[in-house]
Amino acid sequence: MNTPHVVVVMGVAGTGKTTIGPLLAARLGVPYAEGDDFHPPANIAKMTAGTPLTDDDRWPWLDAIGNWAHGRAGLGGVVSCSALKRSYRDRLRVAAPGLVFVHLAGDRALIEDRMSHRQGHFMPTALLDSQFATLQPLEGDETGVAVDVTGSPEEITARAAKALTELP
């Protein structure tokens, strides 16, 4: 299955964006970009220290992701990005109007458990509450789907791919 769309795999930390993103890209036959790689070092330092980012911290990061997505317009691609607020998604859409969002959604307890078992990631579980407090789910006028994160990465990816094929 190929798609000309650029798909943003979004959600709070620990939902599996970095795991599902490359699997979904492979399934769709398009390149994958890791959203965390677009963060400037100052953002990573803040998050590592357990300090939530401000909107001012996020704008250059979102702009960099938006520029990548713009460059993939008509070619397709998958990028991971928390995209927690509507204003963040709107900013991404300014750069790349045809974006499609896959919101990885799940129970807080499940996500916290997964975060506590992962190795080598800068986002501490202490920031999970601020992530959920910030999260604004996709609205009816936003192109995208919510996908439950229970099950294996392969099951989640299959649900996401199927949901994308059902979009108008």
Image (cartoon, helix red, strand yellow):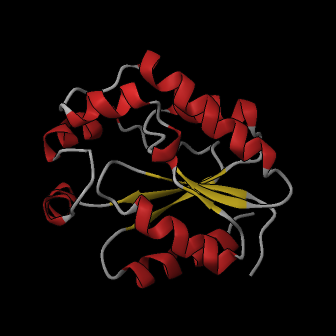
Q: In the rendered view of the protein, which quadrant contains the N terminus?
A: bottom right
Question: What residue lies at 37% left-to-right and 25% top-to-bottom?
Answer: 42
**Which residue is pictured at 28% across the width and 27% down the height?**
46
- Identify whether 72 is placed above or below 49: below
Classify residue 139 by image quadrant.
top right
In the rendered structure, the answer to whether residue 152 lies left or right of residue 94 reads: left
Q: Residue furthest top?
A: 56
- Can see residue 90? no
The residue lying at 74 percent from left, 33 percent from top is 95
The residue lying toward the viewer, choosing from 106 and 124, is 124
Q: Is residue 92 left or right of residue 9?
A: right
Position of 43 with respect to 64 (left or right) is left
Q: Position of residue 153 (x, y in %)?
A: 39, 78
Above or below for 159 versus 143: below
Which residue is drawn at the image coordinates 78% and 52% (left, top)? 72
Q: Check the picture and name the quadrant holding the C terminus.
A: bottom right
Asked if residue 143 is positioned above or below residue 57 in the image, the reply reads: below
Looking at the image, can residue 164 be seen?
yes
**Residue sitting at the far right:** 74
8 sits to left or right of 69: left
Q: State the residue in front, 144 or 130.
A: 130
* Residue 48, percent from left and from top: 23, 36
Residue 49: image x %, image y %?
Answer: 18, 31
| Residue at the front extreme, as displayed | 41
Residue 93, picture quadrant: top right
**Residue 41 percent coordinates (x, y):** 41, 30
